[in-house]
């Protein structure tokens, strides 16, 4: 997937502030961070929750951070009936 993305032609970044003229500037800033194509550079869910846009509703006591996804099965060579289990 990364090789495919790298093979795509470079496209000029859109200015979300000019597209979303009437949107909250903090929302636009967060949206820009969330829509970064490169997952290594994209804001994480935990980082997004502490963004100033969410400050009025952010309550760390009510937020549970998920465990990291276990991708050990993703590249295993198993028969179809094993995958269906």
Image: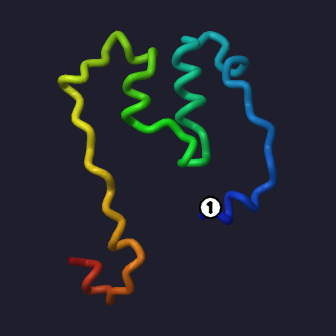
Left or right: where 46 falls relative to 16: left
Relative image position of residue 21 (x, y in whole percent):
67, 13
Using residue 40 as the reference point, say whether residue 65 is left or right of it: left
Indicate the position of residue 32 as horizontal and vertical percent values: 60, 29
Query: Which image quarter: residue 56?
Result: top left
Horizontal relation, residue 40 to residue 19: left or right? left
Based on the displayed image, in which of its 4 quarters is residue 44 positioned?
Answer: top left
Q: Residue at x 80, y 48 (%)?
A: 10
Are there few (<14), some (14-19), or many (20+) residues within 10 Å of tag 1?
few
* Picture layout, residue 13 above or below residue 39: above
> Secondary structure beneath disc 1?
helix
Query: Which residue is the site of mark 1?
Result: 2
Q: How many numbered marks have been drawn onto this rendered protein structure?
A: 1
Q: Residue at x 29, y 79 (%)?
A: 83
Q: Is residue 30 above or below residue 73?
A: above
Which residue is at a point 60% across and 40% down the rendered structure image? 36
* Rendered view: 31 above or below 72: above
């Amino acid at each position: 997937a990364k090789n495919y993305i790298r093979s795509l032609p470079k496209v000029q970044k859109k200015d979300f502030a000019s597209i979303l003229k009437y949107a909250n500037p903090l929302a636009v800033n967060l949206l820009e961070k969330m829509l970064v194509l490169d997952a290594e550079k994209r804001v994480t869910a935990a980082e997004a929750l502490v963004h100033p846009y969410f400050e009025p509703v952010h309550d760390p006591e009510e937020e549970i951070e998920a465990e990291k996804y276990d991708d050990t099965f993703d590249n295993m060579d198993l028969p179809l009936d094993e995958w269906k289990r």
